[in-house]
Image (cartoon, rainbow, N blue to C red):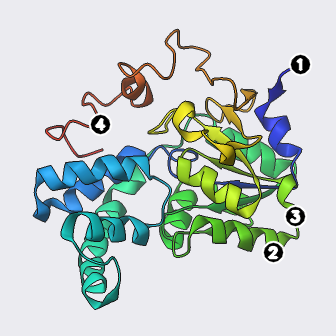
Amino acid sequence: MADRLLGWLAGHETVAFDLDGVLVDSNEVKVACMRAALADFGPVVVEDFLEEFRRTFGRSRREHFAAFHRGRLGGDGEGPEFEEFLARYATGYAELLAERYRTAPLCAGAGELVRELAGRGADLHVATGTLTSEAQKVLADHGLLSAFRSVLGGELPKAKRLADILRSTGSAPHRTVLVGDARQDLLAASEAGTGFLFVERYAFLGAGDVLAGAAAGRSRLVWDLTPDGEVRHASTTARDPHDRHHPHDPHDRHDRHHPHDRHHPHDPTGDETP
């Protein structure tokens, strides 16, 4: 009999969730905010970086801005010049995000799953690239903050956050799982020695791209956080049970992820307001 998400997660000592694209449908909100924050550098440079931003989603905010500084401005991604750049543009990004983050709804099944797990006494945490205060606020706005024992943000890399969770709980790494939607989440889980569950529905990359190589190990995948959703092995493909299209079809992936968005997320002429 196939594993079902609620029971499978409840069988772990500790469950850590990524935030964006897992609990909150905010991935494209963040892309729009980054596009606006970096607008001074022109659409060609910015749109090229946004492709990298999507591919490396799950990194800390500082890591993203350091990558832009190195790859597009010829800087070092560190030192006084970078810190000045970071103070200006990361602050602008944070201000835009503060305005728009609250409009992002919960991902499908997220509220029900978290409340069910919390009701069973599960040890729940959040490990996210979003700054801690921002993550706490959006979870509080959705009435979920109290379900989590800790919310650890992107002031430190996610692998270190997972290590902090393991130290604070005393949980065994093999009895701990990170629920995420990005390759960076998988790599963080691999570094920390925890299990990994890939949630595909809102991800920028499909399972074939995320769950590649030795790091995937015994990872599992699920379509979304619907509590009775089927948990599959990494060698299989997650599917929306109500969708007759394969989730890796490049012609319909983004429309399916954002059914209320009339613009393709990679269209630089589209409306940026989420």
Q: Is residue 19 visible?
A: no
Q: Is residue 194 visible?
A: yes
Q: Secondary structure at mark 3?
A: loop
Q: Residues within 10 Å of mark 1 (few under 14, many from 20)?
A: few
- Determine which residue is flagged by label 2: 167
Report, in whole angstroms, how far the alpha carbon at label 3 lies from the one at label 2.
8 Å
Mark closer to the chain start, 3 or 1? 1
Three-letter code for the amino acid on which mark 3 is drawn: Ser
Q: Residue furthest top?
A: 244
Comparing 208 with 239, the one in front is 208
Q: Secondary structure at mark 2?
A: helix
Specify whether 168 is left or right of 64: right
Q: Residues within 10 Å of mark 3 (few under 14, many from 20)?
A: some
The disc placed on residue 171 is 3
Q: Secondary structure at mark 1?
A: loop
Relative vertical location of residue 9 with respect to residue 63 in this rendering, above or below: above
The C terminus is located in which quarter?
Answer: top left
The disc placed on residue 265 is 4
Comparing 118 with 29, the one in front is 29
Three-letter code for the amino acid on which mark 2 is drawn: Arg
The disc placed on residue 1 is 1
Quarter residue 6 falls in: top right
Instruction: Provide residue 80's location: percent of width, then percent of height.
Output: 29, 91
Report, in whole angstroms, how far the alpha carbon at label 4 lies from the one at label 2.
39 Å
